[in-house]
Image (spheres, helix red, strand yellow):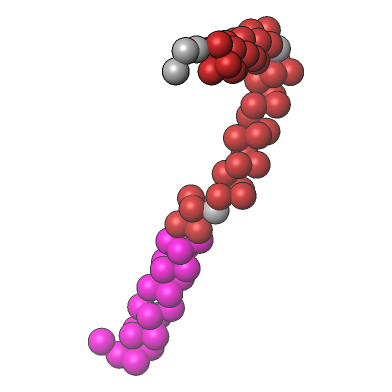
Amino acid sequence: MSMTDAKAAAAKARHELAETLDAIEDRVNVPKRVGELSDKAVAAYKENPVPWIIGGAAVAVIAVGLVAWAIFSDD
């Protein structure tokens, strides 16, 4: 292997390592992932808000029920 071949192989390995590290960084970048999920949720709500409204109402009913249970239980 000549010096030129070794330098080319090293440059290729550095490039591949940089691409791999960039891919890993994209996968573990929490703010970026939260932003993507937020965008998806907004798009889903704009497409069909009914399930979101029903889900929100269900969460509210459960929360009120838990508070009432805590207040009125004999524990």
Kindly give the residue lying farthest to the front in the view shown: 74
User: Foreground: 44 or 14?
Assistant: 44
Residue located at (58% from left, 16% from top): 71
Query: Is 57 positioned to the left or the right of 1 in the image?
Result: right
| Residue 60 position (above or below residue 3) | above
Residue located at (38% from left, 80% from top): 10
Q: Position of residue 5 (x, y in %)?
A: 34, 84
Q: Position of residue 58 (x, y in %)?
A: 59, 10
Q: Is residue 51 visible?
A: no
Kindly give the residue lying farthest to the bottom in the view shown: 3
Residue located at (55% from left, 50% from top): 30
Q: Is residue 21 magenta?
A: yes
User: Foreground: 1 or 23?
Assistant: 23
Query: Is 45 positioned to the left or the right of 14 in the image?
Result: right
Q: Is residue 30 visible?
A: yes
Q: Which residues are magenta?
A: 1-23
Q: Position of residue 12 (x, y in %)?
A: 41, 73
Residue located at (41% from left, 68% from top): 17
| Quadrant of res 49 | top right
Query: Is 28 positioned to the left or the right of 68 in the image?
Result: left
- The C terminus appears in which quarter of the rendering? top left
Kindly give the residue lying farthest to the right in the view shown: 46
Q: How many marks?
A: 0
Magenta span: predominant SS is helix
| Quadrant of res 62 | top right
Q: Position of residue 70 (x, y in %)?
A: 53, 18
| Quadrant of res 36 | top right
